[in-house]
Amino acid sequence: MQLDPVTIQVLWQRLVSIVDEAATGLIRTAYTPSVKEYYDFCCAVFDRNGNMLAHSTVTTAGFLGIVPEVMRNFVKFHPPETLEPGDAIITNDPWLASGHLIDISIASPIFHRGQIVGYTLCIVHHLDMGGRMSTLESKNIYEEGLKIPVLKLYERGKLNKAIFEFMKANIRVPDKVLGDVRAQFVANHVCMRQLINLLEEYQLEGLEDLAHEIIERSDASLRAKIRKLPEGTYHNEVTLPPIPQCPDRVRIKVAVTIKNGGVLIDYAGTSGEVGAAINCVLNMTRSYSAYPIKLALDPTVPNNDGAMRPITVVAPVGSVVNCQPPAATWGRTMISHLFPEIIFGALEDVMPELVLGANGGCPANEIYLHGRRRRDGRSFLAIQQHSGGFGASHRFDGYSTLCFPNNTRNIPIEVTENEAPVRFLRKALVSDSGGPGFNRGGLGQVVEFSILDGEQGPEDFAEGSVRLSNRGETGDFPLQGRCGGGNGRGGGLWLNDKPIDHGIYRRFKPNDRITFQLGGGGGFGVAFKRDAGRVRDDVIAGLVSIEGAARDYGVVIDPRTYEVNHAATEALRARGCPAERRIA
């Protein structure tokens, strides 16, 4: 079949629709909010050589650089000649897959007319894999749960029940976890069926010609954008805020080299791995380092192997960004989610119109609650996720309570209240939390919930952890603004109004109240250059206080009429306008 430009585009979009349909199948058959609400998963399709052609648009964006490596590792362990129709391969090995044990990867070969024509892969963040549960306290991976080597979970369509039994014996809520595993098979089956339909409809023997076009066009598109940037090496270095259970201060050092249409990201000089569950495997570092380059320069081209080829990521073996077994990795996003900001910091002067202010919920905020209900003796396990303010950009204010860079959704509080014996008492935007700027950062939020005192008894308990970004306006690596914009504000965790460390697993008592605040996003451009009318609109909407308008933006607003006092504003701005760097 002749692959003219129109046909290529049609088939390319068809592949994207296939993996999105697989994602829909996963969502509709999954058991847990981690999949159904949080969307912490990825579905992808590959050619027979293991090259990624498309991954689902409903997904965690950081899988961009992980998924191709997972498939390549599967093929190394199980070459095509060892596979048969009905086979399915499983692993959660952090170094072979996506970086921590609670992510399970399942791949299936796709056969057509007796030959492998491609593969499908589904990765899901599961609620539990045994071990110490969700905590930064683990010192090594043996404390973190069950590790599944690369195995055939299904062989010629027959389930290896021993693997399911080992999993069932090691996890707290086996029905939900194994239910989500089965949903992964549904996703793979949908992808397999629809890809075969595509091949038959267009009378294609395989995907190689289409794969070549997709990958080469994506590669060329991103390289063309990279060539528009000034060549050179650009540096950034940050020291992360103190991390509970980690006595070592973690320093991330990066050099970004732009040359000949390619980007080299080198983490030489970064701190060594630590005895806390925050270490990153190279797959994770590669993915979240490449993602901001692709996002800033070429966001509209669907993700595939070609989007990774212009970008090379290297990191010292044994560092916190290229840890080695048996390092603990559960909370790897405490570092990996920061890579986009660190790279944007290095490139702020190179591409100022393409970078974002910091996100107030970065690293991702996650709350895990586990316990047992007295009425039926069954365990419950729930996850929450809430976002801080999105960073402002050259063109727009930041959105309030929108996550970045993980691209997951907030889990509705009604879902969590149904999953666990908790009641939410407050969930509200925090005025003045967005970083001031010509474009303002999005607002953060405060959330409060309590442990119910209903059916609790000697056999009832609730325990869990709250993991926060632990960043604010000041201190080490704050919620930075860009190009003269102010830092985002807010942050903290309290148990019954007393501040506590995050990321620690605790047992809660009935009526305990847990309160946390997520910061606002960083601003962009000089705040005193923001139009006074826009500031007035923010005050009326409750996003900025009258005091904040004067303090941060030099805009004086009458508290009775909410009109701008232009004379007083002009005088205040003349006295207090900060030194200009650049404006949006």
Image (tube, helix red, strand yellow):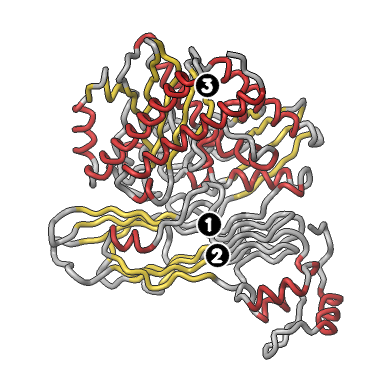
The amino acid sitting under disc 1 is Gly
The amino acid sitting under disc 2 is Gly
Residue 456: horizontal and vertical position, in percent? 18, 67
Contact, CB < 8 Å: mark 2 with mark 1?
yes
Position of 532 with respect to 86 (left or right) is right
Position of 516 with respect to 30 (left or right) is right
Contact, CB < 8 Å: mark 1 with mark 3?
no
SS of the residue under disc 2: loop
Position of 33 with respect to 312 (left or right) is left
Q: Which mark is residue 361?
A: 1
Count of residue discs: 3
SS of the residue under disc 3: loop
Q: Give how far apart the Cα atoms at labels 3 and 2 are.
A: 39 Å
Looking at the image, is mark 3 or mark 2 earlier in the sequence?
3
Residue 383: horizontal and vertical position, in percent? 36, 54
* Front disc: 3 or 2: 3
Residue 300: horizontal and vertical position, in percent? 64, 39
The amino acid sitting under disc 3 is Asn
The foreground one among 275 and 371 is 371
Name the residue that disc number 2 marks: 444
SS of the residue under disc 1: loop
Q: Where on the picture, by quarter, is residue 303?
A: top right
Name the residue that disc number 3 marks: 51
Name which residue lies at 45% across and 56% down. Answer: 410
Image quarter of the C terminus: bottom right
Looking at the image, is mark 2 or mark 1 earlier in the sequence?
1
